[in-house]
Amino acid sequence: MKRNVFLLLLAVILVAAPLSFIRHSEFGGTDDKAEKAIQAIDPKYKPWFETIFEPPGGEIETLLFSVQAAIGAGVIGYIIGVYKGRAGRRDEAK
């Protein structure tokens, strides 16, 4: 159990560490390009809301998206494993 907590903490540190080193970036996302295209079509357009957190660069945004995808894949894999284990125990009981 302690080893799992240590590995989880290490993974969080490895993911979060690059966030503290990268301050500026020259990469832009599709959201920025879409906003510029909308402004070109209708200069009076105002966005409905502002973002809560804006990452310092495109690389960080990609990193956070990848971490989100990995967490989602882990949750789905865990759920599939739980159901597979239940089915296996049910088959053994018969």
Image: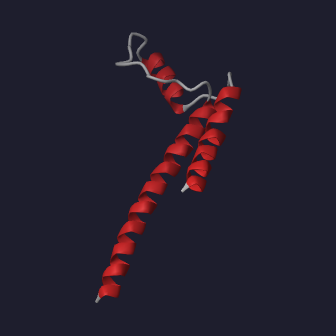
Whether residue 21 is situated above or below residue 90 in the rendered picture: above
Q: Position of residue 62 (x, y in %)?
A: 58, 38
| Left or right relative to 41: residue 60 | right
Question: Which residue sits at x=56%, y=45%?
Answer: 66
Q: Between residue 60 and residue 34, name the one nearer to us.
A: 60
Q: Between residue 31 and residue 4, name the one nearer to us.
A: 4
Report the colour scheme: secondary structure
Question: Which residue sits at x=39%, y=74%?
Answer: 85
Q: Residue furthest right?
A: 21
Q: Residue furthest front?
A: 2
| Left or right relative to 34: residue 61 | right
| Left or right relative to 26: residue 83 | left
Question: Which residue sits at x=64%, y=30%?
Answer: 19
Whether residue 45 is situated above or below residue 63 in the rendered picture: above
Q: Does any portion of residue 26 appear in the rendered image?
A: no
Q: Position of residue 67 (x, y in %)?
A: 54, 44
Q: Quadrant of the N terminus?
A: bottom right
Q: Between residue 53 and residue 46, name the one nearer to us.
A: 53
**Total numbered circles:** 0
Question: Which residue sits at x=39%, y=10%?
Answer: 44
Q: Position of residue 11 (x, y in %)?
A: 61, 46
Q: Residue furthest left?
A: 94
Q: Does any portion of residue 80 appear in the rendered image?
A: yes
Q: Position of residue 49 (x, y in %)?
A: 37, 19
Q: Quadrant of the C terminus?
A: bottom left
Picture quadrant of residue 55:
top right
Q: Residue furthest bottom?
A: 94
Whether residue 78 is situated above or below residue 52 in the rendered picture: below
